[in-house]
Image (cartoon, helix red, strand yellow):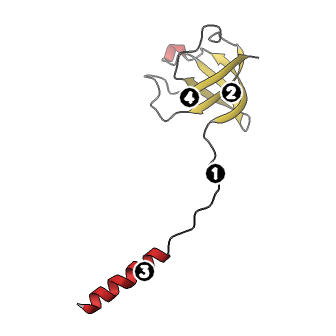
Amino acid sequence: MRKLIFFLGIILIVSCKSSEKTSNTRVANTLTKGKNTGVVSHQYKAEGCGTIIIANIENDKPLNLIPMNAMDAKFDKDNLKISFDYLPLRVKNPEGCNKGIPAQISNIAIE
């Protein structure tokens, strides 16, 4: 019985002393800051996508963003060049639309 208590005490002491020190580094926010540019498109409307923003963000490859909230009518015009901020969302794509990634679009301005 004494051996059991002794071993439990040793395990308790070792586990308390082995905690890692935390650092004061900040985790980068997933919100893409700064203005990104893109073109509003309705080219996939027949497939169920509605409005798509085609942006050149990642290594000059076009990135199709699907705005999850309805865009204001003055921005929802085909071939309109806009600047914006975006936050990729982890939600399902709209029914029938697999041509981009869902995103929350904010700070929209006409280029």
State the quadrant of the N terminus.
bottom left
Q: Would you name the residue on which mark 1 appears?
A: 26
Q: Earlier in the sequence, mark 2 or mark 4?
A: 2
How far, Cα to Cα, is label 2 from label 4? 12 Å
Which mark is in front, 4 or 1?
A: 1
Marks 4 and 1: CB-CB under 8 Å? no
Question: Looking at the picture, does residue 63 appear above or below residue 14?
Answer: above
The residue at the far left in this view is 1
Say which amino acid is labelled 2: Ala
Where residue 78 sits, quadrant-wise, is top right
Q: State the CA–CA distance, disc 4 to disc 3.
A: 48 Å
Element class at badge 4: strand
| Badge nearest the viewer, 4 or 3 | 3
Q: Residue at x 69, y 34 (%)?
A: 33
Name the residue tied to disc 3. Answer: 13
Secondary-structure class at tag 2: strand
Q: Residue furthest bottom?
A: 2
Viewer-closest of 100 and 22: 22
The three-letter amino acid code for the residue at tag 3 is: Ile
Q: Which numbered marker is on residue 55?
A: 2
19 is higher (above) or lower (below) than 107: below
Q: CA distance from mark 4 to mark 1?
A: 24 Å
Asked if the residue under mark 3 is in contact with the one under mark 4, i.e. CB atoms within 8 Å, the reply is: no
Q: Earlier in the sequence, mark 2 or mark 1?
A: 1
